[in-house]
Every structure is written in C-alpha cells, then in structure tokens.
DNA sequence: CGGCTGACGAAAA
DNA sequence: CTTTTCGCCAGCC
C-alpha cells in the first residue's frame, strides 16, 4: 500500500476527509492522520489546516485535538469563533472543550476504509 | 545549514 | 489533574 509520504497527496487526503465531516460531528488531527495512512503525522494535519484550506471552504472548526479541545479557536478571526461555528453545527462547546466529545467524535476511517 | 517552533498524540511519572 | 519525553515533518530565523 502507499507507504510513500507525499505532501500533496497527504494534504489532499486531509482536505477530503475534513470536507466529508458530517454536521454536528467533529474529528481529531490524529484520527485524520490515521485515516490517510500516517498515524504520526498529526502535526502535519494541523499545519495543513493551519492555512485554513486557503478558501477551500473546509469546516476546519470541526477539527480539534484528540481531547475534543479547540486549539485553533483564535485562528478563525476572533476568539470563540470556532466554538460558535461548532455550536451552530449542533455541538455544545464549553470554554475550549467540546461537550460529549465521546459521542460527537467522528471517525473518518469508518467512511474511508468502508 | 542548524535550531526552534508548531491548530498534535500518546505514554509515563 | 499537571508535567515531561519522544516522535513526526515543515516552515521560519
């Protein structure tokens, strides 16, 4: 299987996964990294999302860390903006943490490896 | 060209 | 709960 690490392919896979996140759900960087075949590249996922998809219209606010905590809340133009978007998606957010993260969490590997 | 940092993760203490 | 360590790669100084 594709064990070769391709930055372009990796980014494309990340975009694809993030774009298919259902409303009212959220996923983690590690989950995406795993889904694309790079378990330890969670950081690269964050970097790829760091550019916010550059007008790709990706629901980056649905991507949080493994603990369901919003690390990039200040990257959406204003603090609390990300939580607001999540709340609009039907996800309860308290402070920087998603409420019921366990049931809100969406595993992309289930939709990719299906 | 080397070192630091970073929307991270997981394990260990 | 907090803090530390290791891993991974890319971008910046």
Image (cartoon, coloured by chain):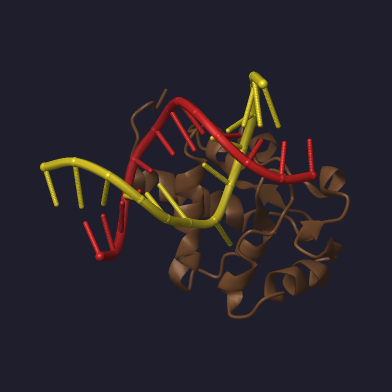
Chain colours: A brown, B yellow, C red
Q: Which residue is painted at 33% across and 30% down in the image?
A: A4
Above or below for A79 versus A27: below
In percent of width and height, residue C9 lies at: 34, 40
Describe residue A61's horizontal placement relative to residue A2 as left or right: right
Q: Which residue is painted at 45% across and 55% down in the image?
A: A47
Q: Nearer the viewer, residue C6 or A35?
A: C6
The mark total stands at: 0
Q: Nearer the viewer, residue B11 or A60?
A: B11
**Toward which corner of the image does residue A54 lie, by quadrant?**
bottom left
Q: Which residue is painted at 65% across and 68% down in the image?
A: A73
- Residue farthest to the bottom, as pictured: A78
Describe residue A64's horizontal placement relative to residue A89 as left or right: left
- For the question of whether residue A43 can be seen, the reply is yes
**Toward which corner of the image does residue A108 lie, by quadrant?**
top right
In percent of width and height, residue A78 lies at: 63, 80
In percent of width and height, residue B9 lies at: 62, 37
Above or below for A12 versus A50: above
- Image quarter where the N terminus of chain A lies is top left
Q: Which residue is painted at 74% across and 55% down in the image?
A: A22
- For the question of whether residue A59 can be seen, the reply is no
In percent of width and height, residue A8 lies at: 34, 49
- Image quarter where the C terminus of chain A lies is top right
Above or below for A22 versus A33: below
Describe residue A5's horizontal placement relative to residue A71 as left or right: left
């Amino acid at each position: 299987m594709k064990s070769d690490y391709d930055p372009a392919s990796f980014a494309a896979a990340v975009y694809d996964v993030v774009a298919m996140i259902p409303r009212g759900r959220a996923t983690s960087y590690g989950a995406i990294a795993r889904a694309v075949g790079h378990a330890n590249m969670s950081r690269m996922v964050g970097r790829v999302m760091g550019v916010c998809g550059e007008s790709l219209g990706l629901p980056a606010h649905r991507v949080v860390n493994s603990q369901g905590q919003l690390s990039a809340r200040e990257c959406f133009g204003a603090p609390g903006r990300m939580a607001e978007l999540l709340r609009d998606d039907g996800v309860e957010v308290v402070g920087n943490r998603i409420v019921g993260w366990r049931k809100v969490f969406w595993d992309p590997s289930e939709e990719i490896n299906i």
